[in-house]
Amino acid sequence: MTRRNFIKWWIAAGWACILTISALFMFRRFRETTGHENITEPATATPQVGVAEANQRAEDAGPLISFFIISDLHINSGISVQSNHLRKALDDIKTFGDKAQAIMITGDVTDSGTPADYREFKNIMSQYELPPVYANMGNHDYYNVWIGKNGTWSQDTFPNGKTDAMARQAFTSMFNLEKPYHDVRLNGFHFILLSQEAYVQEKPEVGEGAWYSEEQMNWFRSKMAENKDGKPVFVMIHQELPPVGQDGGNHMLIKAKQFREILTPYRNVFVFSGHTHQDFTVSTEHYIQETFHWFKNSSIGLVMNTKYENVRKDAAQGLFIEVYSNKVVLRGREFSNRTWIKEADWTVPLSD
């Protein structure tokens, strides 16, 4: 190569280098100004610090609302154990004062739904100054059809002159409701309580399953449609859900596919069920994440192990919920000794 040709090659190479660097610089500026950051660059600590600071500010500001969820009280006028468990729970809850703005009861308020059971429940509740109490129906709240004239279980004389309609009337009268399903807004948050609407007197095929009418399901759909701002929504049911893609049967929510379909478009939905009585300290899965956050509560009246044995006779458990601007904190409470249950401690970040 001649000296002249070498100089030409050197100048060309220099310009190529300059143009390449300029192109890379312009490309980077373009990505930065249009929001397309270089994804190959390692993330800095600044965003993490910002998130931590935001979380701390939310903590310092305190919860926007706090409430208890209790389930499966099984109040029985002839058995004192369940009544004593409820008193222990209320003795503990009252110590929270204005830190608890509501109590939600997710079904089986009574053991058999008899007038005497409801009188016992009302008598206990009247002895306490409590935040507002809301409830839905469980299968046991329909059990008066099994109770004979002498006040004992009488399967042979079913339905013992009783009807499912009478059970619904007893429940709605106790809680001053027009229908067994209803909703309420507290501190700007939406609570929806769905209720079993029929039992074996009207629909023998439902067994111990939760049957919801199409009227209730349409109402549920319309109520969910009111929530377009992404704020947490709290849905109370009693029986648990079957596996995804299935409708439920005995001891489950029957119209489960429709229930899930209604919830699918919404974020930050929390569903709470009872019925299974499972001790928070056993290996049973109490939190299941689907398109919503599903929590299985324990029981006030009878806490059971995985074999459905009531081996811990004194136990009475529930959930305490705190809602912050960026998360929901859920903690299991052992009311018998007023302690937090370490196995039931969840923090769920809220999605934007």
Image: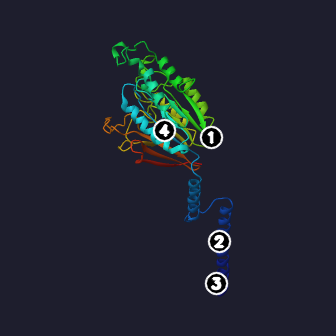
Q: Disc 3 designates what residue?
A: 6
Give the distance between the C-alpha atoms of the residues marked 4 and 2, in whole angstroms.
Answer: 64 Å
Q: Disc 4 designates what residue?
A: 69
Give the distance between the C-alpha atoms of the residues marked 3 and 1, in whole angstroms.
Answer: 78 Å
| Label pair 3/2, CB-CB below 8 angstroms | no
Q: Disc 1 designates what residue?
A: 188
Q: Amino acid at mark 3?
A: Phe
Q: Amino acid at mark 2?
A: Thr
Query: Residue 2, position in %: x, y?
Result: 64, 86
| Observer-nearest of 198 and 93 | 93
**In this rendering, the label closer to the viewer, 4 or 2:** 4
**In this rendering, the label closer to the viewer, 2 or 1:** 1
In the drawing, does residue 98 fall left or right of residue 110? right
Name the N-terminal-most of marks 3 and 4: 3
| Observer-nearest of 26 and 87 | 87
**Regarding mark 4 in the picture, which secondary structure is present there?**
strand
The residue shown at (46%, 24%) is 119
The answer to whether residue 289 is visible is no
Q: Disc 2 designates what residue?
A: 20
